[in-house]
Image (cartoon, rainbow, N blue to C red):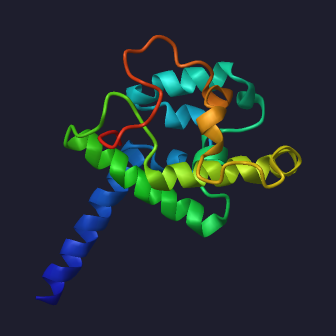
Amino acid sequence: MRVAIVISIAALLIVAGALMVATDFTAYLGSNPVTCNNCHLMDAAYEGWYHAAHSSWATCVDCHAPHAFVPKYLFKAYSGYRHVTGFLFKEHPTILRAIPLSKDIIHENCIGCHETAVEDIAFGAMDEGRYCFDCHRTIAHGERGISILPYRDQETDR
């Protein structure tokens, strides 16, 4: 019985290790924007970022993930799980929208990098019920281009 458990665990570790090598798992631990663009759904977002103002200063992770070490990797694991299961089960949307957790993180990162400007501009007058990107949508990813979909997020979007 004990030998079967050891063999099962060893086989599981070997399969997990092979999958990690085959998928270049460690690349997803970094912050290279090319890694984010591995999925064809990210083409428009990547191209928009590449040609927009923030490409000189920020990568995908700088805006879309928490900056603290542990929360960043917990969020990356959660996002990775959602992306992989969405891909495997064909549940990923054709138009990507940030989920509420992602919106909060992006907003916090905007303020974190632009704290002085936000203080100077808003000084308490800013509508606290809005995200930075509600008004500054084109800053990080440029213009969206021609689309039949509205700019605003909808409840059915992911």
The reply to whether residue 152 is visible in this rendering is: yes
| Residue 47 position within the rendered picture, expressed as x and y whole percent measured from the top left | 56, 20
Q: Is residue 30 left or right of residue 93?
A: right
Q: Note whether 57 is above or below 43 in the view shown.
A: below
| Residue 24 position within the rendered picture, expressed as x and y whole percent measured from the top left | 45, 44
| Residue 68 position within the rendered picture, expressed as x and y whole percent measured from the top left | 67, 64
Q: Is residue 104 left or right of residue 40?
A: right
Which residue is painted at 64% across and 33% down in the image?
Answer: 135
Furthest-top residue in this view: 146
Q: Viewer-proximal residue, 85 or 102?
A: 102
Which residue is painted at 55% across and 26% down in the image?
Answer: 46
Q: Is residue 109 left or right of residue 48?
A: right
Which residue is painted at 17% across and 84% down in the image?
Answer: 3
Q: Is residue 11 left or right of residue 33?
A: left
Q: Viewer-proximal residue, 144 or 83?
A: 144
Quarter of the view holding residue 154: top left
Q: Note whether 153 is above or below 53 in the view shown.
A: below
